Image (spheres, grey):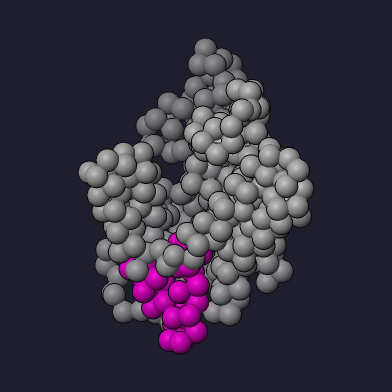
Amino acid sequence: MRGGSFRIARIAGIDIQIHGSWLLIVALVSWMLADGVFPDRYDGWSGVAYWTVGVAAAVLLFVTVLVHELAHALLAKRRGLPVPRITLFIFGGVSELGGQPETARAEFAIAAVGPAASLAVAAISGTVALTLGSGNEKVEAVFAYLATVNVLLAVFNLLPGFPLDGGRVLRSIVWGRTRSFRRATVVATRVGEIFAYGLMILGVYFILIGFLWNGIWLAFIGWFLLNAARGESSQLQLDTILRPLRARSLMHTDFISVVPGMPLQEVVDNFMVARGERAVMVANGDAVLGILTVSDVQRVPRDEWMSTPAQRIMTPREKVETVSAETPALDVLHLLGDRRLNQVPVLEDGRMVGLITRRELLDKVQVAGSLAPDEPSSRHDADTQSGN
Ligand SMILES: [Zn+2]
């Protein structure tokens, strides 16, 4: 379980996760189908039948969303981009790509293959509905629904609201034309923001003319897309700021080092509380044995802090993620993000020379960001991004 998500499978090295909000949307869709769509269209089923078919269709809908995401993810992997995970959540799915495509052409292909997969699923579902479904109303109901929704999915995702697939397609086209990824991202995120505002306004309009739930849903999606587009532009800013930097310039060298036998109480009183350190090194002279963090300490009951030595609960050195002083700052950021770390020690020739904390890194980015010129830099490629 991480960030409200749990893993249900691993496909081609990609973790498939479900976010808690996904269960809500599956329940909603099941209810909508069992209580509205199917009873309107098909007469004379039992209540149990409406619900069974409704739930089956809702679950299969999300299987087809997964197919859409897998199409993005597998093509991205073939183009050399790591894809740590796909998450299904309330608005559908996201494939997390561990980097940006190298070329405009690659980005175009990776973005376009998702809607193409949805159209293929729609065609297959339509065929099943027409053939197998002709003798069985329930099969027809499920597959006709899947066909319709997958066409809608493909169309919706092709709208130019970055970070929807259509927005990525737009970016790849602008990128190809202007040869500037940065400018292309700026254009695509602007269009995405306008599009998101448009959806929100349309949502409010729907609410005013009486389509309450459709209106709320549209406004909600608009709000989500607006945040996503803004996230993407701050990602670009982050990338621009961090690209020239290495771990050496982000670390602090005055990290605290304690002896292995020091009781937690002493570490907490003298360093964590008094100096605000979230992590200290546990070392014997020059030899680092491990790292002790605030979260390690939190796992020990308070009344045992006096009797527990640092060494007993620290994360031992061989399990600690480290970077070298020459590691690019963007890689450090990825590592902190991917492993959900609050800090990472910096090594040079096997010796620990500094510590980078997430907070310091983000502070530096913020200061640099508020002082940065607006002029675009030429090259970029960078962070974990999400694509719908
Ligand atoms: Zn997509």
Question: Where does residue 364 sit, x and y in percent of width and height?
Answer: 37, 58
Task: Assign the N terminus to one quadrant of the image.
Answer: top right
* Residue 161 falls within the magenta-colored stretch: no
Q: What residue appears at the point 48 percent right and 25 percent down from the top-left corner?
A: 266
- Boundaries of the magenta span: 162-190
36 horizontally vs 116: left or right: left
Can you say whether 253 is above or below 110 in the image? above
Is any atom of residue 87 visible in this view? no
Q: Position of residue 42 (x, y in %)?
A: 59, 36
In the image, 1 versus 16, the foreground residue is: 16
Between 284 and 307, which is closer to the camera in this rendering?
A: 307
Is residue 284 or residue 10 the one in the foreground? Answer: 10
**In the figure, residue 126 lies in which quadrant?**
bottom right
Pinpoint residue 334: horizontal percent, then vertical percent.
Answer: 55, 57
Quadrant in which residue 79 is drawn: bottom right
| Residue 144 x, y percent position in the rendering | 63, 49
Where, by quadrant of the figure, is residue 233 drawn?
bottom left
Front-most of residues 139 and 103: 139
